[in-house]
Amino acid sequence: MPEPVDIRVLDASGAPAVPERLPVRPGRGELRYLSMSAVDDIVTCPEKARRRRILRYDWGASGPMIIGSTVDRAVEHWINELLQGRHLDVHAIVDYYYRVALPAELEDKKIGSLAEASFDDPQDNAEVALLGGRRALELYIHVLNGYLKDWEFVSAQEEFVFRVSERVAWKVTGKLDVFMRHRRFRDIYMIRDLKIRVKPMMARAAAESLQGPLYMAGKMLEGKFCYFGYDSINRMAKGKTYRGNIDGDWRDIRYELLHSVKGESFGAGLVRHEVPHDDRLLQRAVRRVEMAAVELTSNFERFGPDHHWPGVGDRNPGHWSCSAERCPFFSACPSGGLLTEGLRRAPQMSDFSAEAPVAHAS
Ligand code: SF4
């Protein structure tokens, strides 16, 4: 973990309510880092945050997550080789994807094969995902080669760490998928974040995401002016066209790499979203992290680590994230599956209708 940098800009930070320290987790010591996914958990569902961030329950590995990380590993290897002066062709990197990246990822996630992982989409499975991941990788190497005209790579999967103010002990952390520097304008940098998904990332999700402004803020604090963009690759495109923002211009996306699995055709399609670099957005991102720290510590103080915290299922029933497919805690959660199950068993109007059998006392 690199050393945190000093805070010098972003005067949004340091509101007195922001906790100086984060909760001490039972048997695991003080929580010292907040990542973007931790902030997401805290903001979307406090109960999920309690289970994942305080109690460190295992999240389990989904097939789409494994494929996304496998492609990340292969892209990291390709960039690192390039930084060493070796330009791997697409066959060499595909070979690395199958032979090295996938086994390493399965070992990390402690599962024997991709077929053991779960898949939400009924059309998605190990075979579709593996081939889709390969196509996504091929497409992304093509895209990265295109960036090399104006940019040079600085690093892949680089970690950054910063504190939101000098007053707090905890730090914000994140990883930059691809970090580049402009060839001509040497003090301009660019972060590219690769998202491998079943569906393409929509413009609204990109505009509302915390990640872009937060990561730009992290690099700004190191004195590096940078831009941020998402490269979203849809690995199960099926002949549909999406309106995508490519280099600031809205066009139909063309699927370049098509393949077929058991008679079904899929393809890999790319959508790019550029996040505006604006100091107010950067400040708001830091404030969102601060507010997440406030919420986490106040829930911890009010409910403690061992009792249920109000979940998104209580605040916002039917929220997309609160379902058996999206939340591994659903079946055992009083705000999720346990509640829905209880409601199903509760007496219904029909139990009291005239047709319903009525038990008479003899
Ligand atoms: S089931 Fe719903 S309320 Fe419970 S942890 Fe999951 S998302 Fe939160």
Image (tube, rainbow, N blue to C red):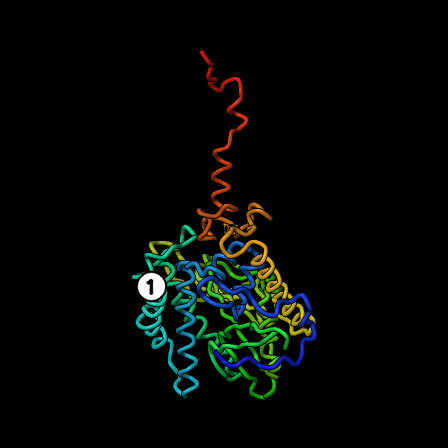
Q: In x, y percent, where is residue 226?
A: 60, 79
Residue at point 55% right, 84% down? 181
| Mark 1 residue crowding within 10 angstroms, few (<14) / some (14–19) / many (20+) | few
Q: Does 345 appear above or below 304?
A: above
Question: Of 146 and 343, which appears nearest the observer?
Answer: 343
Residue at point 40% right, 57% down? 265
193 left or right of 298 in image:
left
Residue at point 57% right, 84% down? 182
Snapshot quadrant of residue 112? bottom left
What residue type is disc 1 on? Lys
Question: Of 356 and 76, which appears nearest the observer?
Answer: 356
Cβ of mark 1 under 8 Å from ligand 1: the answer is: no
Q: In x, y percent, where is residue 257?
A: 42, 66
Q: In x, y percent, where is residue 66?
A: 39, 63
Residue at point 42% right, 76% down? 76
356 left or right of 288 in image:
left
Total labels: the figure holds 1
Point out the image quarter for the C terminus.
top left
Snapshot quadrant of residue 114? bottom left
Disc 1 designates what residue?
110
Question: Of 332 and 23, which appears nearest the observer?
Answer: 23
